[in-house]
Image (tube, rainbow, N blue to C red):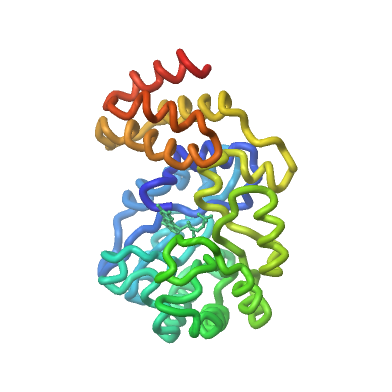
Amino acid sequence: MEGVIDFAMREILTESGSYDHAVTEFIRVNDHLLSKSSFHKYSPELLKGGQTKSGTSVYIQLLGQHKDWMAENAYRAWEVGAPGIDLNFGCPARTVNNHKGGSILLREPDVVHGIVKAVRQAVPDAIPVTVKMRLGYEDKTLAIENALAIEEAGASSLAVHARTKLEGYKPPAHWHWIAKIAKRVKIPIIANGDIWCREDAFKCVQASGCQDIMIGRGGLSLPNLADVISKDEKPLSWQNACALIVKFAGARRDGKNANFVPNRIKQWLSYLKREYPEAEDLFGQIKKFRDQDKMITVINRNYL
Ligand SMILES: Cc1cc2nc3c(=O)[nH]c(=O)nc-3n(C[C@H](O)[C@H](O)[C@H](O)COP(=O)(O)O)c2cc1C
């Protein structure tokens, strides 16, 4: 998740090994070849075999509209060690869509097909090329056409966020629409949208007919959600969630300014408060701080 799940967060969330794989924040591809260091910036895991410490592979996500530049950059991502390439046709951000990137491309299945095909042909067959889409831009009329185009172009799997761009993040996610897609294509479909707890996961699997699910915000709200779903673990205690915040704050952040970590802690609390009422209290106590050490002192004193 762009601006939210960086390598330090991936390290923490994947620690128990319950995620099959993770995806980087999207890397914007315009009309040039990105430097190798840009890929390392988004995925320091590349220096360690493209995996988090627990061995979860981290695919590089590309977002762009020019098929040849997407292909060139996918090749470069492979050259620097990406274990897989993921293509983003789901981003709803206005600035991205205004520049013809993300979900707006779902208006043009031919263009989507061209991008997926060019990327598929650019990297070795053994490297998975996966795709992420929404159900559409304004409406869902092209959902199946897009999925068929993505399959025909050679994608290894397709993750579907069960909303259109126009629906934004407004509940509900239309899981039954994923079932319509899954009935028409043979590649694995991964269901995504509004999975916040174990029960949601089962409901989603039932409604979508998919075996595989993708978790975004839910994993931030409940950091062991993947274990809760797949191993029936108990939800993480607030105290243990605080220990993760401290760990997150302590991770190396090369090239980031002093505000980066304090802002990310506040941002994470905004997700955590969905699961933990204490997160709201903690936010109140630290919201004026700009210094992460002061924040950590409060956490240590009051919650650990
Ligand atoms: C702040 C934010 C940033 C996101 N960035 C990305 C991204 O970079 N790439 C991507 O494929 N999806 C991104 N998403 C979408 C999520 O991956 C996911 O599809 C969406 O939030 C619905 O799933 P959820 O209900 O499990 O969060 C982002 C979502 C949010 C809220």
Nearest the camera: 215 or 207? 207
Nearest the camera: 273 or 223? 273
Q: Position of residue 166 (x, y in %)?
A: 40, 71
Could you tell me if residue 295 is visible in this image?
A: yes
Nearest the camera: 31 or 260? 260
Tally the numbered discs. 0
Which residue of the protein is positioned furthest toward the top in this rendering? 301
Q: Is residue 123 above or below residue 109?
A: above
Q: Position of residue 250 (x, y in %)?
A: 42, 26
Q: Locate residue 193: give its quadrant.
A: bottom right
The residue sitting at 46% across, 62% down in the picture is 170
State left or right for residue 256 relative to residue 298. Answer: left
Q: Position of residue 51 (x, y in %)?
A: 54, 46
The residue sitting at 49% across, 80% down in the picture is 140
Nearest the camera: 273 or 83? 273
State left or right for residue 131 relative to residue 20. Answer: left
Q: Position of residue 263 (x, y in %)?
A: 32, 36
The residue sitting at 64% across, 79% down in the picture is 180
The residue sitting at 39% across, 61% down in the picture is 76
Could you tell me if residue 129 is visible in this image?
A: no
